[in-house]
Image: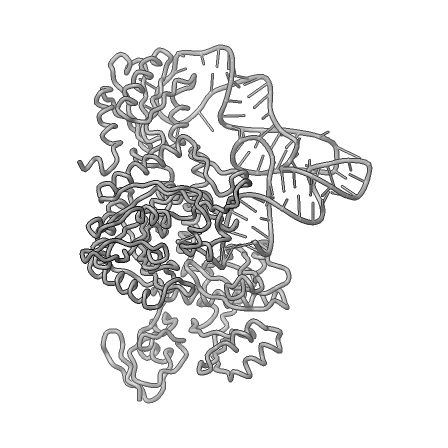
Amino acid sequence: MPAITLPDGTVRQFDGPVTGTEIAAAIGPGLAKAALAIEVDGQLRDISRPVEQDAAIRFITRKDETSLEMIRHDAAHVLAEAVQSLYPGTQVTIGPSIENGFYYDFYRNEPFTPEDFPAIEKRMREIVAANEPFVREAWPRDKAIRFFEDRGERFKAELIRDLPADEEISIYRQGEWLDLCRGPHLRGTADVGNAFRLMKVAGAYWRGDHRNPMLTRIYGTAWRDQKELEAHLHQLEEAERRDHRRIGKEMDLFHIQEEAVGQVFWHAKGWRLYTVLQDYMRRAQTRADYQEVRTPQLVDRSLWEASGHWDKYRHHMFVATVEDEDKTLALKPMNCPCHVQIFRHGLRSYRELPLRMAEFGACHRYEPSGALHGIMRVRGFTQDDAHIFCTEDQIAAETVRFVAMLSEVYKDLGFEHFRIKFADRPEARAGSDETWDKAEAALKEACRTAGVEYEYNPGEGAFYGPKLEFVLRDAIGRDWQCGTLQVDLVLPERLDASYIGEDSARHRPVMLHRAILGSFERFIGILIEQHAGKFPLWLAPTQVVVASIVTDAEPYAKDVVARLRKAGLTVEADTRNEKINAKIREHSLARVPVILVVGRKEAEAGTVAMRRLGGVDQQILPVAEAVSLLAEEAKAPDLKRN
RNA sequence: GCUGCUGUAGCUCAGUGGUAGAGCACUCCCUUGGUAAGGGAGAGGUCGUGAGUUCAAUCCUCACCAGCAGCACCA
């Protein structure tokens, strides 16, 4: 006699086990039609499954976000059926829902190509139109294994074998086709709807392990209706439009070429952006009481052995030898061991702690070729790196200070929202469990003190310590992990860093590794995509162009340029033999924020006609006024505050 | 690194078993034009690299390099 509690608090009694479908029908025909699935005591289930005991329930309709995930999961099943019916002999593996869609991994000798998509999609739409109900069956383990093995589905059989012994093996049928699946599912294939599209194919390792066979993965996107699908496709176009590689080329910011794979040739305009950002960061860290240092690029192998990096990352380091000397050196892949050397140089007192040591550290890592991506993932990069040597007692206060500094920087750079993840011990790690207990506890305590809220990111810590990851949200809703704060009790030990305490004895400092931007290369890539190349004035590679209308105004245009330059602005004169329309068009396409147009009138009156990027109107100003206005606007945000 | 795809002028791309084309950009000439393309002429490429097949390869085959997407990686 289950008593079913509805979300509004009303309770309904039923005589015996009752399915979600029946409950919905008892409430009303509208709901019976709309209900796709049911949540029983917070657990999502098939609507066709009976509820046997008292429970609080909630129906999932198409309006719920939850339905999206189910639509995608079901779409993956529909895809798998379509593929197996069109390409016999293809083995199925897994097919989950993911952000924005779904995928299914198949094993097939010949990989799929996008040319196969129209046929597969057509078959999928037929399956959706047939509206086969999803029927759940519980099978004995042996039967399930035998069934899939008999069909030559060795991956599925392996999955079942690896399921925990006490787990029920559930099979979902849709018409003739069936799949091992935990569920839950929608009512039938028609609930998937038609707002889906196959997107791309890619290789993927079986179980994500590069030692396993490569499967062929088909990605799709699926939504509740056509409008959502179109919005998503539009978002993809938007991301492509903002691609930093494309904009970097268009705006002449940088390039990369074969002779220096994974390393950036910064052109004048890109380098201006870089230096403006670096100057800003230098001021920020000076305000926050950091001391800036500089350490060598090439460091003897012995230091990397001592730090533990040689062991773990040797194959990702650039190694150099000298013919006349029997030495092996490595281009530094990170700065911490070098910073410890400065810390160790001479006796340190507890009075010097916390000691905040910063470096715009140029690092090199031999990243796998497939990981490289524009200037976002490179082999030569510069970190806004710093190490804070402090006592355990100081971790909390330093965390508070760091989060404050980082928040200000992100805000100044135009990112209002960020979130924090707490990454704890990875499987492969240095240091004892006690050390990790201590480090994790200290960092959690620091977060509590700082009033910092975080999500967990289990097993993703650095090999020497737990870390906080700071994740930005950009203008089109994408997340970028940039900042980090890592507690390290291991490296000071390994490299024997110590200070003299109040008690005249030697003590181990704690090292906090921290970065805000991460690397300049990657962060500038993010900035480019955030602004779609239309930078705020202080960051713009070319801030102003003075465009003359007639030859007579040329000397005046050059004079205006000189005055703007004197005020510290980056300015170009455009006195080419072109019509003003063409000049406006070109500089607008080049994303120059301000165009000052000068003709005979302006030359005589000592004025400029100012036009903003994206605007259509103009503003006539005396030169002096334009110069002071733009100079003020072009100040970095921290300088405006003073 | 793995799987798939791609590599032709500075950029975006077309094209063919008989050593190549467009638009934009560039140079020069005409034009002095008032807020998103004025007109004309010209120059520019050993078709990613190397080997093979062929009378003949930018095109076919193989290897390598690089790029793109995804996976794996990211101290």
- Tell me residue B46's x, y (percent): 66, 31
- Quarter location, residue A7: bottom left
- Tell me residue B60's x, y (percent): 71, 45
Looking at this view, is A6 or A450 the one in front? A450
- Tell me residue A28's x, y (percent): 32, 75
Q: In this view, does A42 lie to the left or right of A375?
A: left
The answer to whether residue A444 is seen in the rendering is yes
Q: Does residue A232 lie above or below A66 as drawn?
A: above
Pick the quarter of the image with the N terminus of chain A. Answer: bottom left
Looking at this view, is A230 or A584 the one in front? A584
Q: In this view, does A601 lie to the left or right of A171?
A: left
Q: Is residue B60 left or right of residue A527?
A: right
Q: Colour scheme in the image? A: one colour
**What residue do we see at 44% from left, 73% from top?**
A183
Query: What count of labels does the image hold?
Result: 0
**What residue do we see at 22% from left, 25% from top?**
A628
**What residue do we see at 32% from left, 35% from top?**
A276
Pick the quarter of the image with the C terminus of chain A. Answer: top left
**What residue do we see at 35% from left, 44% from top?**
A530
- Tell me residue A15's x, y (percent): 32, 89
Q: Does residue A567 lie above or below B72 as drawn?
A: above
Q: In this view, does A453 lie to the left or right of B1?
A: left
